[in-house]
Amino acid sequence: MSAPVINGKQVSEDIRGALREEVERLNKLGFTPGLAVVLVGEDAASQVYVRNKEKACHDLGYYSEVHRLSESTSESDLLALVDKLNKQEDIHGILVQLPLPKHINEKAVIDAIAVEKDVDGFHPVNVGNLVIGDDSLLPCTPAGVIELIKRTGIEISGKHAVVIGRSNIVGKPVSLLLQRENATVTMCHSRTANMKELTRQADILVVAIGRANFVDASYVKPGAVIIDVGMNRLDNGKLAGDVDFESVKEVSGPITPVPGGVGPMTITMLMQNTLIAAKRLRDQA
Ligand code: GUN
């Protein structure tokens, strides 16, 4: 029998419905959460992501600013814009779309974003707070993974979670969040020896290695929960996850598809972070 498919689109719509209601309530009190997105250059995928973020703001009643800058923008001009947005009272969240052009130091730009407006959760202070378990703005995709697992009614506490991939954006933070939820966590990556021996012990397997269809049924313990964070564009233009969905779903437990699994959760978590940041800034004002 084939495994249940985790519907990330539906979960995402449920959360967005609650966000929309909360923003309506705040609007009536004369307060509107605001998100600024900065895009430098012409990267095609980035343009799509930024349009989707703009649309989400519009759909949920947030104030939105999108700053589209030319590829040749200097680092100092970009830093000046970030500084202006840091001080702007109607902006509560700032997201600089990555990757940036090669002549710009990504780290310098991330470090310049005000910690309390860092809705990507990439600033070192927010990363540090995540590590020590203090309140912080959480990175969107990892937060979306945890939310998706919980809202599917899956218990994380006491489970063995295996994460494949150790990126700063997904693998590392998702492993910390799983630990925070009381899972026992094993991390695997491209140099891990005998990876299958480890993944076959996983009750929850999170895959974020960036290789199309990398995980097949031979990596999976029967009944395991499979969360596929991969988004790989194939030569034929189709989107593929890091998990070979067709073979894995025959042995696994609940499994996320690509598209329609983790993907829709990322922008939803960005909108949730922006609302959290907005309320904190309002309460501090
Ligand atoms: N580019 C791809 N994913 C992301 C993300 O989550 N945040 C930002 N800022 N850029 C990205």
Image (cartoon, grey):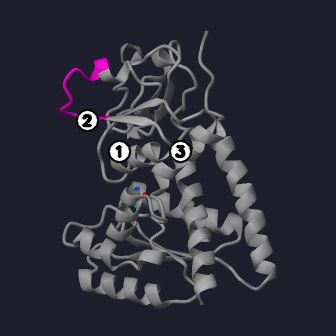
Left or right relative to 229: residue 157: right
- Residue beneath the point at 56% across and 57% down: 269
**From the image, which quarter does the N terminus lie in?**
top right
Q: Which portion, as a residue range, is magenta?
A: 187-197
Badge 2 element: loop
Ranked by sequence position, the earlier of labels 1 and 2 is 1
| C-alpha span from label 1 to label 2 | 9 Å
Q: Position of residue 39 (x, y in %)?
A: 40, 70
Identify the amino acid type marked 3: Ile
Q: Evaluate if marks 1 and 3 touch, with contact meaning CB atoms under 8 Å apart.
A: no
Q: Evaluate if marks 1 and 2 touch, with contact meaning CB atoms under 8 Å apart.
A: yes
Ranked by sequence position, the earlier of labels 2 and 3 is 3
| C-alpha span from label 1 to label 3 | 12 Å
Q: Residue 200 is drawn in which quadrant?
A: top left
- Residue beneath the point at 48% across and 76% down: 117
Q: Which mark is residue 245?
A: none
Reading the image, the residue beneath label 2 is: 189
Is residue 51 inside the magenta stretch?
no
Q: Residue 209 is drawn in which quadrant?
A: top left
Badge 3 element: helix
Q: Which mark is residue 146?
A: 3
Give neighbour class at mark 1: few <14, some 14-19, many 20+ (Cα, 10 Å).
many
Q: Quadrant of ligand 1?
A: bottom left
Q: Position of residue 107 (x, y in %)?
A: 25, 69
Reading the image, the residue beneath label 1 is: 171
Would you say the beta carbon of the disc 3 residue lies within 8 angstroms of ligand 1? no
Identify the amino acid type marked 1: Gly
Identify the amino acid type marked 2: His
In this view, the residue farthest toward the top is: 1
